[in-house]
Image (cartoon, rainbow, N blue to C red):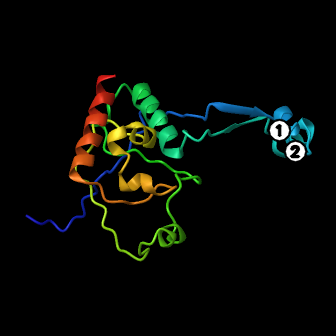
Amino acid sequence: ADTGRVTEIALRAVIKGTGSALPRNRVSNAELANKVDTTDAWITERTGIKFRHIAEPDETTSSLAIEASRKALDAAGMSASDIDLIILATATPDPTATAADLTKNGTNPWVGVRVAPVRALPNPVTLAQVKADPRLQAMALLKYQRLSVQPVTAPEWAIMLSLANETTRR
């Protein structure tokens, strides 16, 4: 029966673990001073920075996010199937194709795209894995210099699933 009372529902999010990842290439102010007109003291005095990490071509925001997510799951003593969502906040997302890139390749950049999940992969598949697999060399995703939304054929999807399952067994 409706009593007319408002029932409060407590929604909560719990942080059970955190993780982080940095690019392998660590550059000191002294190293930077050898390349540009500056000094360690000048940089430190103005920014407080002594070192910075610079991503190599095979290190992307998403690859570092995957590493950090795995560390967070390990820290929490959980697996990916135990959680609903991982939130990534970044000012440096992986590159995407621009309208100019698409036009230059002779395709129409003004296309509506509906992206919907088909099935969750048991493990992430990195762009490096896709590029390294000879069976995927003709994949539309690899035809452009930057990541973009591209169709994936059924055979390509089957290969992606096999790569995700191989990662599980490692």
In the rendered image of this protein, does residue 135 appear above or below residue 108? above
Relative depth, front residue between 113 and 100: 100
* The furthest residue to the left: 1
Residue 153: x and y in percent read 25, 54
In the rendered image of this protein, does residue 78 appear above or below residue 144? above
Q: Secondary structure at mark 2?
A: loop
Spatial CA span between label 2 and label 1 = 6 Å
For the point 62% across and 31% down, which residue is it? Answer: 24
Residue at the spot of label 2: 36
Relative depth, front residue between 99 and 131: 131
Q: How many numbered discs sit on the rendered protein?
A: 2
Q: Secondary structure at mark 1?
A: helix
* Three-letter code for the amino acid on which mark 2 is drawn: Val
Relative depth, front residue between 98 and 9: 98
Proximity of marks 2 and 1: CB atoms separated by less than 8 Å: yes
Residue 27: x and y in percent read 75, 34
Left or right placement of residue 19 versus residue 140 in this view: right
Locate the C terminus and report the quarter of the image it occupies.
top left
For the point 22% across and 47% down, which residue is it? Answer: 155
For the point 35% across and 46% down, which residue is it? Answer: 85
Residue at the spot of label 1: 32
* Three-letter code for the amino acid on which mark 1 is drawn: Leu
For the point 47% across and 33% down, which residue is it? Answer: 67
